[in-house]
Structures are given as structure tokens and as C-alpha cells.
Image (cartoon, rainbow, N blue to C red):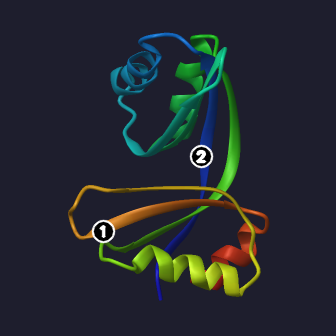
Amino acid sequence: MHNVKKETELEVITPNEPGILGRVLGTLANSGVNLKALRAYSGKEKGVFFILTTNNKKAEKCLKALGYEVKTNQVVTVLIDDRIGAGAEIGALLGNAVIDIENCYGSSAGMEKTLLVFKASDNKKAFDTLK
């Protein structure tokens, strides 16, 4: 039904300081690691990045070398048509299956597809529901 995958995202904890976005993304770029999706926010003292890449092992090694804490999280991704209501349909499917979404982010470049990333209370059930 949908293009659904089980993937691993990197959760990167950094200092909260000006230029940290450029430093994190520049490190990945200089290492030849391409981003598939990104979510970032900052707290008072920390920056938090959720990053889906084409090469997590390489990305993790480079980011840890800068002294950043890097964890891995299992997530479910779904590539859907970029149209009004497509995300709502995915949300309804997961809700009807009584799957709690811990966090979600997505990206569309206006190129007919949107990538949604979910960390759910039950990733296997989310994957099976969307497949």
C-alpha cells in the first residue's frame, strides 16, 4: 500500500550555541553523509537533533569525534504522495490501530512525495499497519 521502511535515526545531543546547526550539518557534509530527514530543537543548554542519514555509522563516528552524545532510535518511515490529506490518512490509520506516536516529523520538497518519520509506542505494529 505505502512505501514503508523500518529505519534507524540518530539522536544527537549538542551544546546549545550559535552555529551548532551549521557545525553538525557541515560535519556530515564534509564526511560525505547525505541527510534524508532532520528535526532539531534546543533547550536552555542543549541542542537536540534527530537525523536520518544515508550512512548512520559514518555519521555517528564523525559526530562522536566532536564530543557529541549520539544515540540510535528505531523509527518507521513512510513515503507518501505530496497532496492535501495524505498525512491525515496516515495519522488515521495509526490512530485506528491504537498506535501512540511518540514523535513524528516530515519533509516535502514539493516534488510529489513527502517523507514522514515516526517513533511509535509499537514500531512493528505501525510498520505492519502502514505496509
**Please, what secondary structure does the residue beneath circle 2 have?**
strand
Dot 1 amino acid type: Lys
> Would you name the residue on which mark 2 appears?
9
The outermost residue toward the left is 111
Considering only order in the chain, which callout, 1 or 2, is on the residue closer to the N terminus? Answer: 2
| Vertical order, 15 against 76 (above or below) | above
Q: Residue at x 79, y 64 (%)?
A: 121
Quarter holding the C terminus? bottom right
> Would you name the residue on which mark 1 appears?
113
Going by the image, does 52 lie left or right of 103? left
Dot 2 amino acid type: Glu
Q: Quadrant of residue 113?
A: bottom left
Q: How many marks?
A: 2
3D distance between C-alphas at marks 2 and 1: 20 Å
Q: Residue at x 77, y 81 (%)?
A: 98
Comparing 1 with 88, the one in front is 88
Q: Residues within 10 Å of mark 2 (few under 14, many from 20)?
A: many
Numbered tag placed on residue 67 in the rendering: none
Give the x, y percent position of residue 85.
Answer: 39, 80
Comparing 55 with 127, the one in front is 127
Q: Residue at x 42, y 19 (%)?
A: 27
Give the x, y percent position of residue 64.
Answer: 62, 18
- Front label number (2 vs 1): 1
Give the x, y percent position of residue 5.
Answer: 55, 68
Give the x, y percent position of residue 119.
Answer: 67, 58
Whether tag 2 and tag 1 are in contact, CB under 8 A, the answer is no
Going by the image, does 14 lie left or right of 73? left
